[in-house]
Image (cartoon, grey):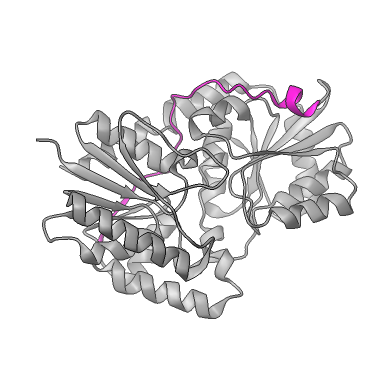
Amino acid sequence: MKKNVIIAFLGNAKFDARCINMANSLFDHGYKVIIIDELAIDEENLESNRFKIFHVKTKFKNGVKRYWNFYCEVKKINNQIKPDIFIAADLFSLGTLSKLNEKCLKIYDCREIYSNLTSLAYKPIKQLFWTYYEKINYKYSDKVLVTAKKDKEFLISKYRFKEIKMILNFPNIKNKKSMINIREKFKIAENNKIFLYQGAIQTGRGIEQMITLLQHFEDSVVCIIGEGEHKQKIIQLINKLNLSNRVFFTGNIPYAELISVSKQADIGFSLIQPLSKSYKQALPNKLFEYGLAGIPTIASDFSEMKNYIVRFKLGIAVAPNNINDHIKAVHKLLKWNDSKLLINTVRDNLTWDSQEQKFIDLFN
C-alpha cells in the first residue's frame, strides 16, 4: 500500500522549484503525494494528474493572521488524510508537526535561517515571535533538511542535535519550452544585451545594483522574472533613473518553463546584500538555474555562493556593493562565450538528479 506524503507550503507551489522536485521524486518512487499550498490571486495555480492538490484560500495577504488561516486549514486537511509522512516545506507550516500522530514521519524543510530573515531585520517584535515559534515547534521534527552547509551549522548551534540532512536546492534537468520570447514581447533589439534577475522581488536581492548598471551599459536592458512586495520600490528607482524603457517585468513564470526563458538572457544576477545572516549564508537556486540555462552569473562573494561560483566556474563573485567590481565583471562576461561547457558542468554536477536519492533515502 502506498504511503501518503503531505507537502505543505505557504505560497504558490506552481512557481516553487523545491516543492515540485520533491513531489515528483516521491511520486516516481511509489508514494502518494498531497500538496497543500496557498490559492494564488491573479495567477495560475499548480495542476497535476500526479498529485492531489489542496489550494488554501487565505483571507489575509501577510502577517500572523495569514499564517494562522493557513495553519488551521492545513491541520484540517491533515486530520482527514492522516499522512504517513508530513513535510513542512517552510517555517510557516512547521506548527502542524505538533498536531501529527507519533507514527507520522515529521520533516522540517528549513530553506533559510528564518529567525534571521531580512524582512524582519527592522521588525524586532515579529522577529522575536517567529524565532520563538520556530524554537518551540522545531523539537517536534524527526528530521530537518537544509540547503546549505552554514545553515546546518547554525541550526546545530542554536537548537542542538537533530538529524539534519543537506539537500541542495538544485534545478531539475527536465524543463518545458516556454511560449514567451523576451525580445519579441518587450521589443528588445538583437544587439541589446539582457541582464536577468529571477526570483522573489524583495529588499536586499541586489535588483537595484543590477538596474544601476544600465547607466554604464547603454546597449543593455534588464529583465526581472518574479513578483514581490518590493516591486513598487524598484519601479520608483526605475522612474527616478529614467529607465522605464529599459527594464521589463515578466511576472511569475511556471518553474517548468523557467529555464527556457532564462536562456534568452546574457548575464544572470544574484547580488544579494549583507542585510541578515539568512542572506549572508544563502545559496540561491538561481545560480544553478542560470548555469543550466547557459548564462554566467554575477553574484555576491559570500562564502557559500563564492565556493560554487569559483569551483564550477559559474561566473564571477564580487563585493555586493562595489559598483566598480560590478562594471568590470559585466565587461568580462559580455565577452564570455562558453554556454555549452557551462550547461554540461551544471548537468553533470548541480541538478536535482544528484540530490534525489539522498532525499528518498530519508524515508527508508
Q: Is residue 287 left or right of residue 82?
A: right
**Residue pictured at 26% horizontal, 39% vertical:** 33
The x, y position of residue 89, in whole percent, is 36, 52
Q: Is residue 247 left or right of residue 131?
A: right
Q: Main secondary structure of the magenta part?
A: loop
Residue 140: x and y in percent read: 23, 66
Quarter of the rendering occupied by the N terminus: top left
Q: Which residues are magenta?
A: 162-187
Task: Give the x, y percent position of residue 21.
Answer: 38, 36
Up the image or down, 212 lies above or below 31; here it is below
Residue 305 in the image, given as x and y percentages of width and height: 55, 48
Of residues 243 and 273, the one drawn nearer to the viewer in this rendering: 243
Q: Is residue 313 visible?
A: no
Q: Nearer the viewer, residue 169 or 243?
A: 243
Residue in front for this viewpoint, 167 or 59:
59
Is residue 6 covered in magenta?
no
Q: Residue furthest bottom?
A: 125
Q: Is residue 166 magenta?
A: yes
Q: In percent of the image, x 46 and y 69: which residue is there? A: 65
Q: Is residue 187 visible?
A: yes
